[in-house]
Image (spheres, rainbow, N blue to C red):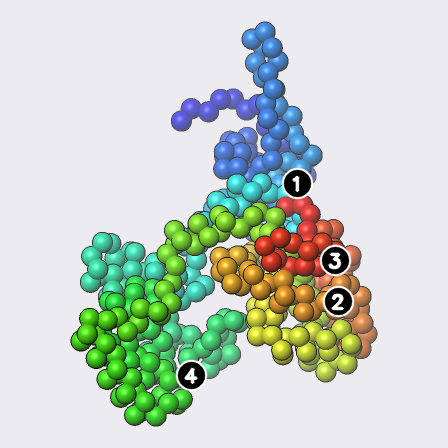
Amino acid sequence: MVWKEPSAAERRLCEQLEAHGLSVSWAKIRRWREFGALPWKKQRGLGRGSGSTSELLPETFVVAEALALATAKKRPLEQAVLHAFTTHPRFDQVLATPAVPLPERAVRRALTWYMARHDSHPFAVIERAAQSAGSCPDKAMEAALEAAHRYFPKLYRQATQRRHPPGMTAPDNLADAGGLATYAVAIVLGFENFGADAIVEAASKSLVDEYDKQAFVQVGKAVREAEANGENPFSRRPRWPSLQDRVQGMEQVEYPMIRTVRDVLALLVEASPALASARRAGSEDPDVLHIEKARTSNRRTDEYLRRAEAISHHPGARAWKDFTGLLLNVCTAPQRLRTFQEDVTALDPALDDVLGLSRRILASCDTPTVPRAAAGTLPAGITSATPLRNGGPGRHTASGS
């Protein structure tokens, strides 16, 4: 493809970035534009064959600066977009409301890119392994089983060292890991591809401490009888949605909802260092006690807080990945999205003033460690007012990107 010479607006943007110590070629800016990552004013004709002109929007430089910082180490543009969307590259750590006004088109393209590549969920790992084997069903099954039987024992070993990912239920032992591996492959590729005996055996390995052997003998007999009668005993078992289904599900979620879920999760990440300090110190602060009570009574609320704390331990250059995984975990699961407002508003009003909460915790813990929320005022964009459509978070809404 032959590109036209840079426009006056593209040259001007290059000059603005250069003035801020960021060397970006006009060709790179052109690629950002074509990807849909830069807010750009439509060109207007000058009339009488004099060509056209375009002007920079006020938010164009903000986005270009973030992308320039995020692509400094030649990362994929999709990764840079997600980095800017979840973690402002100007800062080393995740901050509430990155406030980078990225266009919807770029964010959606980047999320689709992530869904096709991420390995933060065992089902996604298994799906990718099966797809890599090509169109041969036997090879796909073999690749899927191999991937699963690597993933779950590794998860068990991580759990023994207390390093397994938050929100992920770890196997109790290696036998449990083997059973979960087989069951996970069945969920991804379909239970119809396994015999009843294989599924029952996998369940017996995984649940050996919860049921006696006789229970599995009876279950095995029942499912074999069902198979003999031409029935599918596992027809009601869940099936992992395909990548296409997950992408289509994401497309059904309105962009303002995606942004707001992002902002609420960012607020939880921002509050995590202070809350962790409070738990270690046994703080009796009323807001801390309220949060602990909420997470004890709601499993999903506790999961969001634990995953947010894990994200807060990483610099932004790494945090974007786990943050994006958590964002998709909410937005691609209809049931989770429907309950998200209830799950996070259970924390209200304890996080209405994260800065004040951090200062109180610091004072009570008498520690020199300053959580990032206490380093200054929170970025603009998080308010406590407007309920959302489609069952999103009720009190924390966002403006900006």
Answer with mark 3 or mark 2, whichever residue precedes in sequence.
2
> Residue at label 1?
62
Marks 4 and 2 sit apart, C-alpha to C-alpha, by 37 Å
Q: Is 219 situated above or below 390?
A: below
Q: Are marks 3 and 1 in contact (CB under 8 Å)?
A: no
Q: Is label 4 or label 2 in front? A: 2
Which of 258/355 is in front? Answer: 258
How many numbered marks does the figure carry? Answer: 4
**Who's the residue at 21% across and 79% down the image?**
225
**x and y, in percent, of residue 109 in the image:** 48, 44
Query: Mark 4 falls on what kind of element?
Result: loop
Marks 4 and 1 sit apart, C-alpha to C-alpha, by 48 Å
**Who's the residue at 78% across and 77% down the image?**
285
Q: Is label 3 or label 4 in front? A: 3
> Residue at label 4?
172
Q: What type is the residue that disc 2 sits on?
A: Pro
Answer with mark 3 or mark 4, whichever residue precedes in sequence.
4
Q: Residue furthest left?
A: 228
Q: Is residue 244 left or right of residue 24?
A: left
Q: What type is the residue that disc 3 sits on?
A: Ser
Q: Residues within 10 Å of mark 1 (few under 14, many from 20)?
A: some
Q: Is residue 8 left or right of residue 211?
A: right
> Residue at label 2?
349
Q: Are marks 3 and 2 in contact (CB under 8 Å)?
A: yes
> Residue at label 3?
384
Marks 3 and 2 sit apart, C-alpha to C-alpha, by 9 Å
Q: What type is the residue that disc 1 sits on?
A: Val
